[in-house]
């Protein structure tokens, strides 16, 4: 499973958040978050942490599967 950088960036902009803010709320390093946003596969529990930190559903941050 991969996180959509575009979707996450848009949600972060709506919430006036920076990557560091999201990383802190999700309980991970900014570097690790950056790697995940740049296309690395992600564990479901990590996706859930990021979605919870953004206060959105996981489907709102996953890459679209066409």
Image (spheres, rainbow, N blue to C red):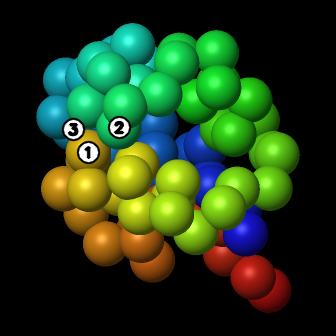
What residue appears at the point 64 percent right and 15 percent down from the top-left corner? 31
Residue 35: x %, y % from top left = 74, 29
The residue where tag 1 is placed is 53
First in sequence, mark 2 or 1: give its number: 2
In the rendered image, which quarter is residue 57 located in? bottom left
The reply to whether callout 2 and callout 3 are in contact (CB within 8 Å) is: no
Question: Alpha-carbon distance for marks 2 and 3?
Answer: 17 Å
- Left or right: residue 27 versus residue 40 is left
Q: Is residue 52 above or below residue 64?
A: above
Q: How far is the residue under mark 1 from the one under mark 3? A: 14 Å
Neighbourhood count class around disc 2 (C-alpha, 10 Å): few under 14, some 14–19, many 20 upward: many
- Where's residue 15, x and y in %? 17, 34
Residue 27's tag is none
Q: Answer with the quarter of the image where residue 42 lies.
A: bottom right
Q: Which mark is residue 26?
A: 2
Q: Percent x, y for residue 12?
A: 32, 34
Disc 2 secondary structure class:
helix
The residue at the far bottom in this view is 66
Q: Tell whether label 1 touches label 2 (CB within 8 Å).
A: yes
Bin the neighbour count of mark 3 within 10 Å (Cα to Cα): few under 14, some 14-19, many 20 and up. few
Of the numbered discs 2 and 3, the one sitting upstream in the chain is 3
| C-alpha separation, residue under disc 2 versus residue under disc 1 | 5 Å
Q: Determine the secondary structure under disc 1.
A: helix
In front of the other: label 1 or label 3? 1
Q: Which residue is mark 3?
A: 14
> Which residue sits at x=75%, y=82%?
65
């Amino acid at each position: 499973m991969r996180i959509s950088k575009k979707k996450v960036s848009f949600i972060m902009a709506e919430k006036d958040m920076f990557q560091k803010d999201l990383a802190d709320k999700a309980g991970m390093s900014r570097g690790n978050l950056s790697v995940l946003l740049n296309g690395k596969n992600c564990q479901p529990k990590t996706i859930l942490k990021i979605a919870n930190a953004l206060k959105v559903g996981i489907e709102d941050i996953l890459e679209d599967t066409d």
